[in-house]
Amino acid sequence: MRAEVIKTDAVIIGGGPCGLFAIFELGLLDIKCHVIDILDRAGGQCTELYPEKPIYDIPALPIVSGQELTDRLMEQARPFDAQFHYNQMVTELEKRGDNEFVVKTDAGTELHAKIVVIAAGGGSFQPKKPPMPGIDAFEGTSVFYSVRKMDMFRGKDILIVGGGDSALDWTLNLQPLANSMTLLHRRDDFRAAPDSVNKMRELVAAGKMDLKIGQVTELKGDNGQLTGVAAKGKEGEFDVACNTMLPFFGLTMKLGPVADWGLNLNENLITVDTEKFETSVPGIFAIGDINTYPGKLKLILSGFHEAALMSQQAFRYINPGERLLFQYTTSSSSLQKKLGVA
Amino acid sequence: MAKITFIEFSGTAHEVDASNGMSVMESAVKNMVPGIDADCGGACACATCHVYVEPDWLEAVGERNEMEEDMLDFAFDVRDNSRLSCQIKVSDALDGLVVKVPEKQF
Ligand SMILES: Cc1cc2nc3c(=O)[nH]c(=O)nc-3n(C[C@H](O)[C@H](O)[C@H](O)COP(=O)(O)OP(=O)(O)OC[C@H]3O[C@@H](n4cnc5c(N)ncnc54)[C@H](O)[C@@H]3O)c2cc1C
Ligand code: FES
């Protein structure tokens, strides 16, 4: 299933606000980008953790929500036509020879780039693992936190745990394939979209699946093969037979593979200089929440500044020997042409 | 002002001073109480500030709000006395409050 290798100027790891602004700053210098994020959309913390909340300290935007800031950054970056690869985690980053970096994702995508910008924020958003005793032993065989290929779940006795959109969506999507389907949730109320909840209730009424109210207390089975769970609800304890369990408890930020790329770290943050925001490996930059330097503030505006300065050095690597002209977007006709406004 | 006690899963107690108006979560983070992760910084968007309010204090602390009730779906081992500590505002009425921290936030 290995796709062909993608060759590009720059790979940006992380599509949070700082990664998005890096597309713009690099774009002004004619550097083409591919952006990779484990989430299914852009915005990082802003859209994952606080889409509706107001931000008050973005210069010139007295108030803007996490979602709106992201939408505006996407609009600002649009002229540069970056390619986005969502739902993929960068697992490997390696320097190969002079001026080439190899980036690989857990979905099999391989990119070769002249420079790499790590804008991984607080780390990759990963599914929360419920702290159920012994769950590790079932992971990958009976317990899954995401669905990559639906077909894997054909004919299974599936237990889905949770009440959010992921839990409900996968209940509805997998129910037709499953041998049996049970949804277990702590209360008979769901944060998921009402439409999905109604559909689920219809399936229950038609006898096509079960809905149980309670919380898992114990996993049963051995050798990685789940046979059922014990659960507790308001009316007491009960068992659910199943050979596959999908818990959906939202996402949490974990540093993830960033720690394995041989870069100098300080307390799980990548150390950079404050002239170029370059890591201990020349050609690999780190901007936004993931980096650290004396005086670092984990603010979006700091990440924007870092993106601008990083881009200058990126230009020098990509165009060795060429002079970089300092220009204003207000008055430079060449910048305006790139922006599509001239 | 209120004194708040956080009891870790291991039994270790941490007493902190909290000012009125701040959240119980903030008082924990400010004093580096272990076990309150608060990934989202109090936006009621992560459920990693989950605590169990000691039964005597349930009334003073009040009811969960609707957003919090939804977010608790993303917490583990939710009980009747479960709260998200970023949604509890400190006031004089909470002086002496005791909450237990779960074994793991996730
Ligand atoms: C509730 C809350 C309120 C905030 N309010 C403000 C505010 O008012 N003002 C302010 O300036 N800041 C605020 N912040 C902080 C601000 O959100 C962060 O500084 C900002 O999001 C950092 O942007 P970033 O692009 O560096 O990283 P992030 O937004 O964290 O994005 C990083 C992205 O990289 C992805 N990623 C990481 N590793 C990998 C990998 N290996 N492979 C693929 N993808 C990966 C992640 O999935 C994520 O999407 C707030 C934060 C929170 C939680
Ligand atoms: S700090 Fe995230 S929900 Fe309370």
Image: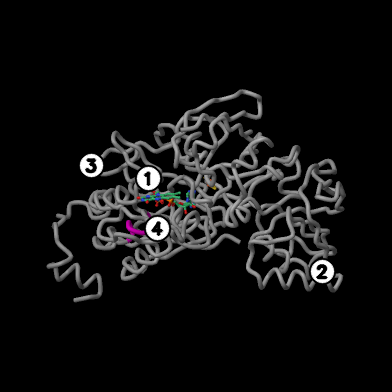
Q: Quadrant of the N terminus of chain A?
A: bottom right
Tags 3 and 4 both on a single chain: yes
Q: Quadrant of residue A269?
A: top left
Label 2, secondary structure: give it: helix
- State left or right for residue A75 relative to residue B9: left
Can I make out residue A284 in this image? no
Residue B90, position in %: x, y?
A: 50, 39
Query: Which residue is farthest front?
Result: B93
* Residue A54, label in figure: 4
Mark 1 sits on what residue? A97
Q: Secondary structure at mark 1?
A: loop
The yes-or-no answer for disc 4 within 8 Å of ligand 1 is yes
Write down the residue under mark 2: A204
Q: Residues within 10 Å of mark 4 (few under 14, many from 20)?
A: some
Q: Amino acid at mark 1?
A: Gly
Cα–Cα gap, marks 2 and 4: 39 Å
Report the front residue among B48 and A8. B48
Q: Is residue A259 magenta?
A: no
Are dots 2 and 1 in contact, CB under 8 Å?
A: no
- The chain identifier of the residue carrying mark 2 reads A
**Relative to B70, does residue A237 appear above or below in the rendering?**
above
Mark 1 is surrounded, within 10 Å at the Cα level, by few (under 14), some (14 to 19) or many (20 or more) other residues, namely few
* Mark 3 vs mark 1, CA separation in Å: 25 Å
Compared to A192, does B42 lie above or below? Answer: above
Q: Which callout, 2 or 4, points to the residue nearer the camera?
A: 4
**Amino acid tagged 2:** Val
Sequence-wise, the earlier of marks 1 and 4 is 4
Q: Which portion, as a residue range, is magenta?
A: A19-23
